[in-house]
Amino acid sequence: DPIVRTLDEITVMADSLVAYARGQADTEETAEIDLAALLTRLCAERGAAMAPARPLVVRGRPVALSRAFGNLIDNALRYGGAARARLERRGGEALVTIEDDGPGIPAGRIEAMFEPFVRGDASRSAETGGAGLGLSIARGIARAHGGGLRLTNRPEGGLRAEVSLPLPAHPSPR
Protein backbone atom coordinates (compact mmCIF):
# COMPACT_ATOMS: atom_id res chain seq x y z
CA ASP A 1 0.00 0.00 0.00
CA PRO A 2 1.64 3.28 -1.10
CA ILE A 3 0.04 5.28 1.75
CA VAL A 4 1.44 2.93 4.40
CA ARG A 5 4.87 3.06 2.73
CA THR A 6 4.77 6.88 2.73
CA LEU A 7 3.76 6.92 6.41
CA ASP A 8 6.61 4.50 7.19
CA GLU A 9 9.04 6.83 5.39
CA ILE A 10 7.69 9.83 7.34
CA THR A 11 8.13 7.89 10.61
CA VAL A 12 11.74 7.03 9.71
CA MET A 13 12.45 10.68 8.89
CA ALA A 14 10.80 11.92 12.12
CA ASP A 15 12.77 9.42 14.22
CA SER A 16 15.96 10.46 12.43
CA LEU A 17 15.24 14.14 13.02
CA VAL A 18 14.80 13.53 16.72
CA ALA A 19 18.07 11.56 16.84
CA TYR A 20 19.81 14.30 14.85
CA ALA A 21 18.54 17.02 17.18
CA ARG A 22 19.57 14.99 20.22
CA GLY A 23 23.02 14.44 18.74
CA GLN A 24 23.43 18.19 18.28
CA ALA A 25 22.47 19.05 21.87
CA ASP A 26 23.17 15.94 23.91
CA THR A 27 23.30 16.29 27.68
CA GLU A 28 24.56 12.76 28.27
CA GLU A 29 27.28 12.48 30.91
CA THR A 30 30.78 11.61 29.72
CA ALA A 31 32.46 8.44 30.94
CA GLU A 32 35.50 6.32 30.24
CA ILE A 33 34.63 4.00 27.35
CA ASP A 34 36.59 0.99 26.15
CA LEU A 35 36.17 1.36 22.39
CA ALA A 36 37.20 -2.27 21.76
CA ALA A 37 34.35 -3.55 23.96
CA LEU A 38 31.85 -1.04 22.51
CA LEU A 39 32.68 -1.90 18.89
CA THR A 40 32.75 -5.65 19.58
CA ARG A 41 29.24 -5.41 21.07
CA LEU A 42 27.87 -3.26 18.22
CA CYS A 43 29.32 -5.59 15.59
CA ALA A 44 28.01 -8.71 17.35
CA GLU A 45 24.50 -7.20 17.59
CA ARG A 46 24.49 -6.39 13.88
CA GLY A 47 26.33 -9.37 12.41
CA ALA A 48 29.37 -7.34 11.37
CA ALA A 49 33.01 -8.44 11.61
CA MET A 50 35.30 -6.95 14.25
CA ALA A 51 39.07 -7.40 14.10
CA PRO A 52 40.58 -8.43 17.46
CA ALA A 53 41.55 -5.30 19.38
CA ARG A 54 43.24 -4.49 22.65
CA PRO A 55 41.28 -2.28 25.08
CA LEU A 56 41.52 1.40 24.18
CA VAL A 57 39.82 3.89 26.47
CA VAL A 58 38.45 7.27 25.44
CA ARG A 59 36.44 9.79 27.42
CA GLY A 60 33.05 10.38 25.86
CA ARG A 61 29.30 9.97 25.80
CA PRO A 62 28.57 6.22 25.49
CA VAL A 63 25.09 6.45 23.94
CA ALA A 64 26.21 9.10 21.43
CA LEU A 65 29.30 7.11 20.38
CA SER A 66 27.19 3.95 20.10
CA ARG A 67 24.82 5.85 17.82
CA ALA A 68 27.68 7.17 15.65
CA PHE A 69 29.40 3.79 15.22
CA GLY A 70 26.04 2.02 14.88
CA ASN A 71 25.09 4.36 12.02
CA LEU A 72 28.36 3.64 10.22
CA ILE A 73 28.11 -0.13 10.67
CA ASP A 74 24.45 -0.09 9.58
CA ASN A 75 25.34 1.92 6.46
CA ALA A 76 28.14 -0.51 5.55
CA LEU A 77 25.80 -3.49 5.93
CA ARG A 78 22.87 -1.84 4.14
CA TYR A 79 24.67 -0.25 1.20
CA GLY A 80 27.99 -2.11 1.13
CA GLY A 81 26.86 -5.66 1.73
CA ALA A 82 29.31 -6.20 4.61
CA ALA A 83 30.89 -4.35 7.51
CA ARG A 84 34.35 -4.87 8.97
CA ALA A 85 35.44 -2.78 11.94
CA ARG A 86 38.97 -2.27 13.17
CA LEU A 87 40.37 -0.29 16.11
CA GLU A 88 43.94 0.91 16.45
CA ARG A 89 45.95 3.49 18.31
CA ARG A 90 47.60 6.07 16.07
CA GLY A 91 49.66 8.56 18.01
CA GLY A 92 47.41 10.29 20.55
CA GLU A 93 44.25 9.10 18.83
CA ALA A 94 42.00 6.09 18.64
CA LEU A 95 41.24 5.29 15.00
CA VAL A 96 38.11 3.28 14.19
CA THR A 97 37.86 2.05 10.61
CA ILE A 98 34.69 0.55 9.15
CA GLU A 99 34.92 -0.87 5.62
CA ASP A 100 32.36 -2.32 3.24
CA ASP A 101 32.26 -4.02 -0.17
CA GLY A 102 29.75 -1.71 -1.86
CA PRO A 103 30.02 0.58 -4.86
CA GLY A 104 31.65 3.39 -2.88
CA ILE A 105 30.72 7.03 -3.49
CA PRO A 106 31.80 9.11 -6.49
CA ALA A 107 34.78 11.18 -5.29
CA GLY A 108 33.09 14.50 -6.00
CA ARG A 109 30.08 13.51 -3.86
CA ILE A 110 31.83 12.35 -0.69
CA GLU A 111 31.66 15.65 1.20
CA ALA A 112 28.01 16.16 0.17
CA MET A 113 27.14 12.84 1.86
CA PHE A 114 27.62 14.54 5.25
CA GLU A 115 24.87 17.07 4.54
CA PRO A 116 21.55 16.31 6.25
CA PHE A 117 19.01 14.51 4.03
CA VAL A 118 21.55 13.71 1.30
CA ARG A 119 21.59 10.03 0.38
CA GLY A 120 23.75 8.05 -1.98
CA ASP A 121 22.32 6.65 -5.19
CA ALA A 122 22.27 3.14 -3.71
CA SER A 123 20.01 4.32 -0.86
CA ARG A 124 17.23 5.91 -2.87
CA SER A 125 14.89 2.92 -2.79
CA ALA A 126 12.19 2.62 -0.14
CA GLU A 127 13.58 -0.76 0.95
CA THR A 128 16.97 0.58 2.01
CA GLY A 129 16.45 4.30 2.47
CA GLY A 130 16.84 6.12 5.73
CA ALA A 131 16.33 9.85 6.05
CA GLY A 132 19.90 10.71 5.04
CA LEU A 133 20.96 11.82 8.52
CA GLY A 134 23.21 8.94 9.65
CA LEU A 135 26.49 10.41 8.40
CA SER A 136 25.60 13.92 9.62
CA ILE A 137 24.85 12.51 13.07
CA ALA A 138 28.03 10.38 13.12
CA ARG A 139 30.27 13.28 12.07
CA GLY A 140 28.60 15.65 14.57
CA ILE A 141 29.18 13.19 17.40
CA ALA A 142 32.83 12.58 16.38
CA ARG A 143 33.47 16.35 16.25
CA ALA A 144 31.72 16.90 19.60
CA HIS A 145 34.28 14.46 21.04
CA GLY A 146 37.20 16.42 19.56
CA GLY A 147 37.65 14.01 16.67
CA GLY A 148 36.48 13.64 13.11
CA LEU A 149 34.98 11.35 10.49
CA ARG A 150 36.17 10.94 6.95
CA LEU A 151 35.07 8.73 4.08
CA THR A 152 37.33 7.39 1.36
CA ASN A 153 36.82 4.92 -1.45
CA ARG A 154 38.93 1.79 -1.07
CA PRO A 155 41.20 1.13 -4.07
CA GLU A 156 39.91 -2.46 -4.24
CA GLY A 157 36.27 -1.26 -4.08
CA GLY A 158 33.96 -0.34 -1.27
CA LEU A 159 33.94 2.53 1.19
CA ARG A 160 36.10 3.20 4.24
CA ALA A 161 34.82 5.33 7.13
CA GLU A 162 37.50 6.48 9.58
CA VAL A 163 36.61 7.98 12.94
CA SER A 164 39.42 9.54 14.95
CA LEU A 165 38.95 10.30 18.64
CA PRO A 166 41.53 11.86 20.95
CA LEU A 167 42.91 9.62 23.68
CA PRO A 168 43.07 11.11 27.18
CA ALA A 169 46.49 12.59 27.98
CA HIS A 170 46.51 10.82 31.34
CA PRO A 171 44.18 7.83 31.45
CA SER A 172 42.72 7.02 34.86
CA PRO A 173 44.38 4.08 36.59
CA ARG A 174 42.30 0.91 36.39
Image (cartoon, rainbow, N blue to C red):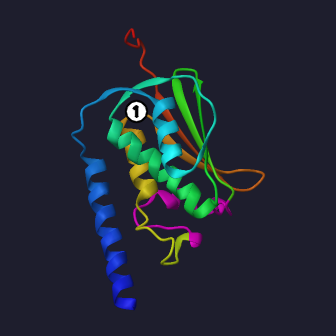
Residue 134 magenta-drawn?
no
* Residue that sits furthest to the right in the current view: 156
Vertically, is 120 above or below 51? below
Give the image quarter of residue 2: bottom left
Quarter of the image where the N terminus is located: bottom left
**Residue drawn at 52 percent across, 75 percent down:** 124
Residue 117 magenta-drawn?
yes
Give the image quarter of residue 158: bottom right
Coordinates of residue 114 in the picture (x, y in percent): 47, 57
Q: In this orientation, does residue 139 appear?
A: no
Identify the secondary structure beneath mark 1: loop
Give the image quarter of residue 27: top left
Which segment did they paint magenta? 102-122
* 106 vs 83, nearest the viewer: 83
Q: Say which residue label 1 marks.
A: 146
Residue type indicated by callout 1: Gly
Vertically, is 122 above or below 24? below
Coordinates of residue 39 in the picture (x, y in percent): 50, 38
Left or right of 74 on screen, residue 58: left
Left or right of 72 on screen, residue 59: left
Label 1 Cα crowd, 10 Å radius (few <14 / some 14-19 / many 20+): few
Quarter of the image where the C terminus is located: top left
Vertically, is 31 above or below 48? above
**Residue drawn at 30 percent across, 56 percent down:** 19
* 70 vs 24, nearest the viewer: 70
In the rendered picture of this protein, how many numbered marks are placed on residues? 1
Q: In this orientation, does residue 15 appear?
A: yes
Coordinates of residue 25 in the picture (x, y in percent): 24, 46
Vertically, is 159 above or below 65? below
Coordinates of residue 162 in the picture (x, y in percent): 57, 42
